[in-house]
Amino acid sequence: MKKTHPIANRRVVFIISALAVGFVLLQFASPAIVNPPATKEISAPEEVTRILKQACYDCHSNAADPAWYGRIAPASFLVAHDIRQGRSRFNFSEWDKNPPVVQELLLWEMVNAIGEGKMPLSRYSLLHSGSRVSASDLAILKKYVNTLPGRHKVDTARIVKPDTITSKLADAKPSQIPVSLNGVSYYPDYKNWRIISVTDKYDGGSMRVVYANDMMYNAIKLKKMPFPDGAVMVKAVWGKQQESSDGMVRPGNFQNVQVMVKDSRKYAATEGWGFAKFDGFGLKPYGKIAIFDRTCINCHRLLAPESDFVFNVPTK
């Protein structure tokens, strides 16, 4: 009979003991899940809040209640990370911190994310089968967001024709070009770029045309992701008039121009993208402080991480 070498036995015992000690010590470093007091919960029909609580509250509220295995390291580190990220994007227990228009935007993005199978996270649903949103639950959520004010928002104002400011900017000096607080400038020649998408934003009653510069267009065409530095997208936004009796929907007044610029170093805090919005015919830069773009990237993180955080990327 072959004898077991005593040195080999000691090594196995040592390794097991070291792993056990390391596991115990790791528990002392395990992050605590803290639930701050709620300031104001989201107000919605009971059937809607029921679905949100079962599918979203563990990461997107101050009522997180991880299962016992989620409190044990190393799993606790991943759980704490997901909760921290979830709350930073939107928090149902601090819903009053969002202006009404942002609340509506977030609800639409949530429903879109659920409908596309991106939320709840697959790794979460795998261990929490009760968090899965059924087809009937999704129908309830869709019915609810379709009752929100923005869904039926139409531009009833007298259509105002633009002045010549945008055409003048085409020949303007660099010092005359509007620049956002975070350094993203307006692109006067964007109308000469390629149109890559036309969209209808249901939660805001607006119509959009999306343009891409050559670098962005070529990257989309070649399916090159992440997009290279220097890629730029511009979205021109108009209001939407009431649908006519024959089903035609026409643009209303011009609202703003939105810009996304890829610079992985300069805009590292927002996934490499610089965001800006220029409002009205005067193209007034949006935002009171330079970090306004955190709100922009949080929506893009929610729904479009697999496309380098860009919405409306053509599939063909």
Image (spheres, grey):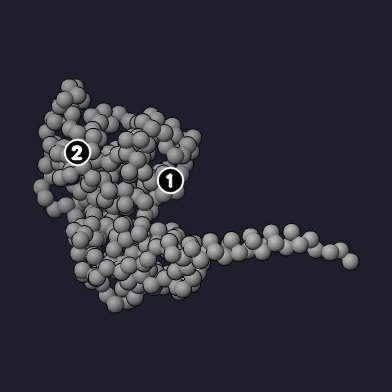
Q: Which of 197 and 282 lies nearest the eye of the viewer? A: 282
Q: Which residue is mark 1?
A: 307
What numbered label is drawn on residue 4?
none
Q: CA distance from mark 2 to mark 1?
A: 26 Å
Q: Residue at x 24, y 50 (%)?
A: 206
| Amino acid type, callout 2 | Leu
Q: Residue at x 14, y 39 (%)?
A: 284
Q: Is residue 165 left or right of residue 88?
A: left
Residue 36: image location, x then y, percent: 27, 68
Check disc 1: other Cα within 10 Å, few if <14, some if 14-19, many if 20+: some
Quadrant the N terminus occupies: bottom right
Specify which label sits upstream in the sequence, 2 or 1.
2
Residue 136: image location, x then y, percent: 41, 73
Q: Which of 67 and 267 lies nearest the eye of the viewer? A: 67
Q: Is residue 32 left or right of residue 247?
A: right
| Amino acid type, callout 1 | Ser
Q: Which residue is mark 2?
A: 181
Residue 8: image location, x then y, percent: 74, 59
Check disc 2: other Cα within 10 Å, few if <14, some if 14-19, many if 20+: some
| Residue 214 position by quadrant | top left
Q: Residue at x 40, y 58 (%)?
A: 81
Disc 1, SS: helix
Residue lying at the far bottom in this picture: please name it.
46
User: Please, is residue 224 above or below residue 243 in the view?
Assistant: above
Residue 224: image location, x then y, percent: 47, 37
Is any part of residue 251 visible from this angle? Answer: no
| Residue 98 position by quadrant | bottom left
Q: Which of 213 and 103 lies nearest the eye of the viewer? A: 103
